[in-house]
Amino acid sequence: MSLLAARGLTVRRGGATVLAGVDFAIAAGEIVSIVGPNGSGKSTLLLALLGILRPAAGRVLRPPGLAIGYVPQRLAIDPGLPLTVTRFLALPRRHPAAAVAAALARAGIAGLAGEAMAGLSGGQVQRAALARALLGAPRLLILDEPAQGLDQPGQAAFYRLVADLRRDLDCAVLMVSHDLHVVMAASDRVVCLNGHVCCEGTPSVVAAAPAYRALFGTGTGGALALYRHVHDHRHDAVGAASGDA
């Protein structure tokens, strides 16, 4: 059963059609990544799913009261604004101190509660934004290029954190990313977008799809190898636990 879905979604911005006839769904507990070239409509799709953009055609289906946590592509923090991490998490409303402490701990920045947002590194800002998204106890996390601007170890650490959150909170994760190698390893399913859905499926299926290779070439072998390594070990563990040969 889908947690959130779109049917025949068409979105226009500034008189131009950005998305046309998009069908999309994410199930509870899934990690789904959306990839595509610049201008392919990835962020537009997220905004339409969130209800921020009104579709020109089609519809978005989601159950009433679905709790969604959203981390935007980037946060512009005025360096002169005296905004601490704790005060940032209180926007637009305050939360119990215990909930704030738990969110900061889950995001891996428990020690930064009193620090100024303007003084944080890029990775710390993203974790603060993630902590804010977690305060609503989301069943679905939507992340728009959450590791943009981070170095490779920082990207890997952030995506490991996302996988841990999915497990610990039993939530689904929908994310947009340009980090193809890491995304392939971190996702259950990949949707390749270029104004419409070009292809979708497991990382191995998408990496071999002609539409994906036409957009990104064949230089994703490392991503696929990493995906196989991670998932083979997971499957081995499941098989051993169940007594399978």
Image (tube, rainbow, N blue to C red):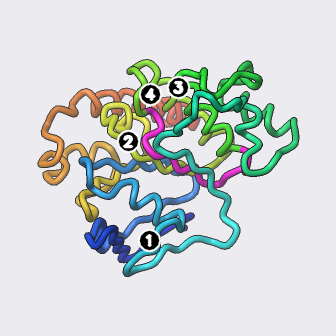
Q: Position of residue 37 (x, y in %)?
A: 24, 47
Residue, disc 1: 6
Residue, disc 3: 123
Magenta residues? 135-147
Q: Is residue 81 above or below residue 95?
A: above
Category of crowding for the residue at label 4, using alpha-carbon neighbours closer than 10 angstroms: few (below 14), some (14–19), many (at least 20)? few
Residue, disc 2: 177
Front disc: 4 or 3: 3
User: Decide: marks 4, 2 in contact (CB < 8 A)?
Assistant: no
Q: Quarter of the image holding residue 227? A: top left
Q: Quarter of the image holding residue 117? A: top right
Front disc: 4 or 2: 2
Q: CA distance from mark 1 to mark 4?
A: 33 Å
Front disc: 1 or 3: 3
Q: Is residue 146 above or below residue 194?
A: above
Q: Label 1 sits on what residue type? A: Ala
SS assignment at label 1: strand
Q: Position of residue 191 (x, y in %)?
A: 33, 54
SS assignment at label 3: helix
Residue, disc 4: 233
User: Decide: marks 1, 4 in contact (CB < 8 A)?
Assistant: no
Q: CA distance from mark 4 to mark 2?
A: 24 Å
